[in-house]
Amino acid sequence: MRMTAPPNTPERLDDAVLIEQSRHQPESFAALYDRYFSEVYRYIAARIGPQAADDLASETFLVAFRKRHSFDPDRGVVRGWLYGIATNILASHRRSETRRLEALARMPPESHAESGHDDRVAAQVTAAAAQRRLATELSGLPDGERDALLLVAYGDLSYEEIAQALGTPLGTVASRLHRVRRRLRAALGDITAESGGSDG
């Protein structure tokens, strides 16, 4: 799917105005595609890899185009709505994402024998261990908590946009992110303690 905004579309026309306009002039929707495709693609690619990201990002905009008549600006912004659609589409690829995280968790640390700098090697090994531990923790998170965290990490969404994207109350988003951050801090703390305790 490829869209190109018509030349007479104002570059920064308000998103909600573009949605409204596209209900009568479908070609106006192309401006939203041009505006948000890259970041939606990056969010999807970060979660399941680049191989399927182009198709799923395109699918996100096809679904959004078909549902543009149901967009309600009183319930949030277009950006959050698009990320909600992308997250729903990703739900059907949950197993692919889990396999990706589990594979990352199993990756052996890279060999740094040629470096010869003990401090740098120790830092690299600790970073690799942290990455594997985080991947393990992410793969074990409940879906709602993982979605909330990755919408922050990969989408840079606000709490309000996450609430809109996931269709959950703002307080639920806040409590999910609090639980996840506490869990991940504990996991990283264990890594730091283990690496610090290995001296001597």
Image: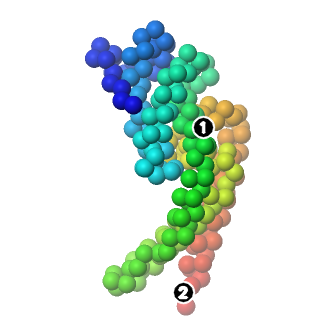
Q: Residues within 10 Å of mark 2 (few under 14, many from 20)?
A: few
- Which quadrant: the C terminus? bottom right
- Outermost residue to the bottom: 200
> Residue 58: percent from the left, percent from the top?
44, 34
Image-quadrant location for residue 124: bottom left
Residue shown at the point (49%, 12%) measured from the top left: 23
* Left or right: where 184 falls relative to 17: right
Is residue 162 something one can see in this rendering? Answer: no
* Left or right: where 64 falls relative to 120: right
Residues 48 and 141: in front is 48
Residue shown at the point (48%, 39%) measured from the top left: 56
Residue shown at the point (58%, 25%) measured from the top left: 76
Which amino acid type is shown beneath numbered disc 2? Asp
- Which quadrant: the N terminus? top left
Image-quadrant location for residue 54: top left
Helix, strand, or loop for circle 2? loop
Which amino acid type is shown beneath numbered disc 1? Asn
Residue occupied by mark 2? 199
Residue occupied by mark 1? 88
Helix, strand, or loop for circle 1? helix
Image mark for residue 192: none
* Left or right: where 123 falls relative to 186: left
Q: Estimate the spatial distance between the alpha carbons at disc 2 and disc 1, rounded to whole Å.
A: 46 Å
